[in-house]
Image: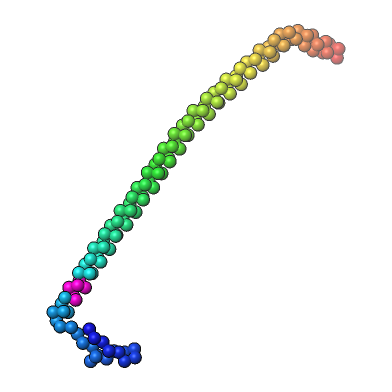
Amino acid sequence: MNVQREGNFVKKEDISFPESQDLEDVIKQILEIDSNARNITDTAMKARIGAEQEVEKKKQELHDTFMERAKNRIEIIKADEGKIATEALASADNLVKINLFQLNQIAEEKSEGWINEIYSSIIEI
């Protein structure tokens, strides 16, 4: 296509078009290029969607793995804490039993003296 310009404008009569066979070939090439471009775009979009789906799948897998590990860790901690609490409770129970036994011994040893002391203080009043 020969185009002659005068400044920034092209005169209509200065434009020459190729023969109709050449024009048909050019149109076929343009349509072929357009078709190829659409195929490339479709392929790229499918790849993009596939990649996005894969990323979402991996994200969910990581989340599930993390949650499973967290649940397992919580169960281990619960078991450990339960064991520690049971041991602490048993220790406190033993201490209470020892203290109660000691208080009962002291009460047995000193109850008669306490009774006499209280009786004496009441009598003196």
The image quarter containing residue 7 is bottom left
Q: Which residues are magenta?
A: 26-31
**Above or below: residue 74 compared with residue 15:** above
**Left or right position of 56 against 21:** right
The quarter of the image holding the C terminus is top right
Q: Examine the rendering and report whether any part of residue 108 can be seen.
A: yes
**Above or below: residue 42 compared with residue 69:** below
Q: What is the x, y in percent for residue 89?
A: 57, 22
Q: What is the x, y in percent for residue 99?
A: 67, 16
Q: Examine the rendering and report whether any part of residue 115 can be seen.
A: no
Q: What is the x, y in percent for residue 6?
A: 31, 92
Q: Main secondary structure of the magenta part?
A: helix
Residue plotted at (26% across, 63% down)? 40
Q: Which one is nearer the viewer's eye here, 69 or 117?
A: 69
Residue plotted at (41% across, 37% down)? 68
Q: Is residue 48 magenta?
A: no
The quarter of the image holding the N terminus is bottom left
